[in-house]
Amino acid sequence: MPYPLKLAKVGLAWLALTKVAQKPFDHAILAGVLVSSSRLWNQGERGISFAETDSDLQPWGQKGAPKDDLRKLYDDAHIWVYGDFTLQFPPRHAGFE
């Protein structure tokens, strides 16, 4: 089994246990995004972004309050999350990597 796939499976198990994402499909999406971002970061890519329209995986709640545990996962993986496919909201902070 290729290493990224093994890492994704470990990520799926961890996400299920921590309940950061509530649904199994969300576990799979989130694990894939986190593993892929880590791989890209380690290969020298910067400015990694992810457009997420599913409110379950957005690192903010309905009224904009942060979901700290989800925000930390994205921040640790160096992923800026946009709420739509225009890649304009929320605006990327200067210097975010």
Image: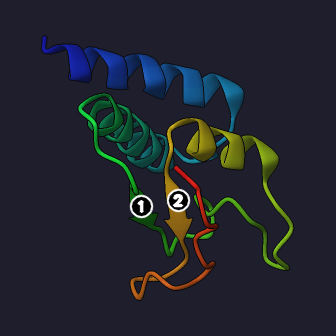
Amino acid type at image mark 2: Trp
Q: Nearer the viewer, residue 65 or 62?
A: 65
Q: Secondary structure at mark 2?
A: strand
Q: Quadrant of residue 93?
A: bottom right
Which quarter shows the N terminus?
A: top left
- Which residue appears at 78% of the width and 68% of the height? 61
Q: Is residue 95 above or below residue 78?
A: below
- Which residue appears at 29% of the width and 44% of the height? 45
Q: Is residue 36 above or below residue 95?
A: above
- Which residue appears at 38% of the width and 32% of the height? 38
With 66 as the anchor, is 76 left or right in this view?
A: left
CA neighbours of label 1 inside 10 A, class few (<14), some (14 to 19), many (20+): some
Residue underneath mark 1: 49
Q: Position of residue 50 (x, y in %)?
A: 42, 62
Q: Secondary structure at mark 1?
A: strand
Circles 2 and 1 in contact, beta carbons < 8 Å: yes
CA neighbours of label 2 inside 10 A, class few (<14), some (14 to 19), many (20+): many
Which is nearer the N-term, disc 2 or disc 1?
1
On residue 80, the disc is 2
- Which residue appears at 45% of the width and 27% of the height? 12
Amino acid type at image mark 1: Ser
